[in-house]
Amino acid sequence: MKYFAYGSNMDKLQMGKRCSNYTFLGKALLNGFILDFTRESSHWNGGVADIVNDPNHTVWGILYELNNKDLDSLDY
């Protein structure tokens, strides 16, 4: 399955820690969204990036190919 990564999941080392098997497909743009820090992390003292609908903005990210197990490991 294709996964659009933004924020800290764009970091190759972080993805390697979270996912056992992923394939980098390339840079990607997501039109109609903006990057925002909408909540605080329960793992560190800082914000967590989210993407929020906004028709006037674009978010840059990375497109990966993941399996379902690895996708579940990103959702914490």
Image (cartoon, rainbow, N blue to C red):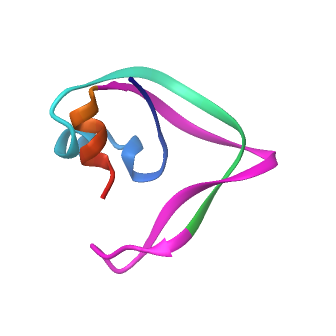
Look at the picture and state if 48 lies above or below 1.
Answer: below
Q: Nearer the viewer, residue 55 or 45?
A: 55
The number of discs equals 0
Question: Could you tell whether 2 is left or right of 42 in the image?
Answer: right
- The x and y percentages for residue 32 are 75, 42
Question: Could you tell whether 31 is left or right of 59 in the image?
Answer: right
Look at the picture and state if 51 lies above or below 31.
Answer: below
Q: Is 64 inside the magenta-drawn segment?
A: yes
Give the residues drawn in magenta, as a range: 38-66
In which quarter of the view is residue 5 placed? top left
In which quarter of the view is residue 24 placed? top left
Of the 4 image quadrants, the one containing the N terminus is top left
Question: What residue do we see at 24% from left, 36% from top?
Answer: 70
- The x and y percentages for residue 10 are 41, 42
Question: What residue do we see at 57% from left, 28% from top?
Answer: 28
Question: Could you tell whether 36 is left or right of 33 in the image?
Answer: left
Q: Nearer the viewer, residue 39 or 16?
A: 39
Of the 4 image quadrants, the one containing the C terminus is bottom left
Q: Residue most toward the right?
A: 56
Question: What residue do we see at 31% from left, 38% from top?
Answer: 71
- The x and y percentages for residue 37 are 56, 67
Q: Nearer the viewer, residue 43 or 1?
A: 1
Question: What residue do we see at 19% from left, 27% from top?
Answer: 21
Dominant secondary-structure state across the stretch colored magenta: strand
Q: Is 67 inside the magenta-drawn segment?
A: no
- The x and y percentages for residue 44 are 30, 75
Look at the picture and state if 61 lies above or below 52.
Answer: above
Question: Could you tell whether 67 is left or right of 31 in the image?
Answer: left
